[in-house]
Image (cartoon, rainbow, N blue to C red):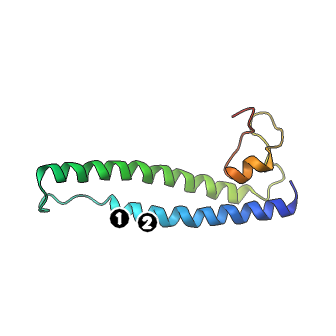
């Protein structure tokens, strides 16, 4: 992988990290506890609880992605960055551009 490709990939990771952090903050707001004294009807309260559950799952996925993005950013300047952790072969630049947190090549994934 060339230095230009690494720089472009680093920029992509940084951009995605910003997007993820913004969405994480939005979901943290949406997953606040539902106050029992809130004037909701029974069905509306159940719907709010279901929405909260869905938002909590989405939040967890984004927190996991944020960790993977951070790790990729920390490792991008390592000489073995972009190599498959399973077989050691180079991961295609197209795959890394699509999924910058990839640690496996297409064959091993």
* In the displayed structure image, the side of residue 28 where residue 92 appears, left or right: right
Give the residue at x 53% y 50%.
64
Callout 1: SS: helix
* In the displayed structure image, the side of residue 21 where residue 80 appears, left or right: right
Q: Residues within 10 Å of mark 2 (few under 14, many from 20)?
A: few
Q: Position of residue 95 (x, y in %)?
A: 73, 47
Residue 76 position by quadrant: bottom right
| Residue, disc 2 | 25
- Foreground pick, 77 / 28: 28
Question: How many tags in the picture?
Answer: 2
Q: Is residue 107 above or below residue 66?
A: above
Residue 87 position by quadrant: top right
Q: Position of residue 6 (x, y in %)?
A: 80, 60
Give the residue at x 73% y 50%.
96
Q: Position of residue 2 (x, y in %)?
A: 88, 58
Q: Is residue 25 above or below residue 78?
A: below
* In the displayed structure image, the side of residue 52 where residue 58 appears, left or right: right
Q: Position of residue 40 (x, y in %)?
A: 13, 58
């Amino acid at each position: 992988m060339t230095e230009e490709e690494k720089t472009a990939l680093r920029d992509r990771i940084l951009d995605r990290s910003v997007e993820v952090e913004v969405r994480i903050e939005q979901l943290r707001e949406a997953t606040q506890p539902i106050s029992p004294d809130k004037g909701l009807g029974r069905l509306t309260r159940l719907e709010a609880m279901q929405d909260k559950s869905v938002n909590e799952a989405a939040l967890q996925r984004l927190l996991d992605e944020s960790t993977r993005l951070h790790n990729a950013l920390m490792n991008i300047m390592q000489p073995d960055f972009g190599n498959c952790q399973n077989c050691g072969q180079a991961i295609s630049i197209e795959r890394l551009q699509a999924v910058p947190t990839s640690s496996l090549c297409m064959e091993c994934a």
